[in-house]
Amino acid sequence: MISPPTGKRLSFPPISRIIENLCREDPAIALDDGATKAILNTKGGAGEISDDLKSLLRYMEGFKPDSDYTRMLNEAVEFVRSDDQWRREYMVLNEMLKENRRMGGYMGKVAQVRNSRHTVDKGTLSLILMIHPHTLQEILDTMDAHPDWDDEKIAETVDFE
């Protein structure tokens, strides 16, 4: 289920819903950023949709392309699947994204240590953050040795493994 800002729950099987960003406190105020989300349900059946959209939904379900658009889309998909350089670049990008998520988690732990170091004892902080006490001590020592460093620099320096 998806909860839009209005609190109304969307239920499927409608084939599609169009969602725009609205203010939670006043749903009459839209975030006029030009962004619109289309939620498509390939298993849906309610509502009128164009033949082109029906063709796209069938294609997404694994059926053969049966319109100009889905044939063009299928050609692009086949090209990407067969292009070794693109696949390598995608794999590199995927690894970079994983590393960024990992580093973001470490930065969050460093920020928590920075915010809690004077109010929460080390044992509790280590348990809450699920980090080894030696790692916590390394974070604290690095903060003390380099008070001008930001969370990212400390996270890059500390061995979290």
Image (cartoon, helix red, strand yellow):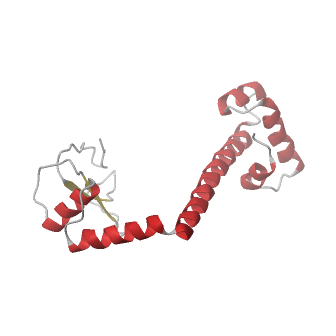
User: Could you tell me which residue is drawn at 56 percent across and 70 percent down?
Assistant: 85
User: Could you tell me which residue is drawn at 82 percent across and 33 percent down?
Assistant: 134
Quarter of the figure with the C terminus:
top right
Residue 19: percent from left, percent from top: 27, 57
Q: Nearer the viewer, residue 135 or 27?
A: 135
Residue 32: percent from left, percent from top: 33, 68
Q: Is residue 96 positioned above or below 135 on the image?
A: below
Quarter of the figure with the N terminus:
top left
User: Could you tell me which residue is drawn at 53 percent across and 64 percent down?
Assistant: 87
Q: Is residue 94 positioned above or below 32 on the image?
A: above
Can residue 111 be seen in this snapshot?
A: yes
Q: Which quadrant of the figure has residue 80?
A: bottom left
Residue 159: percent from left, percent from top: 79, 43
Q: Which quadrant of the figure has residue 130?
A: top right
Q: Is residue 100 left or right of residue 4?
A: right
Q: Is residue 25 positioned above or below 36 on the image?
A: above
Can residue 34 be seen in this snapshot?
A: no
Q: Nearer the viewer, residue 108 or 53?
A: 53
Residue 25: percent from left, percent from top: 33, 51
User: Could you tell me which residue is drawn at 79 percent across and 36 percent down?
Assistant: 135
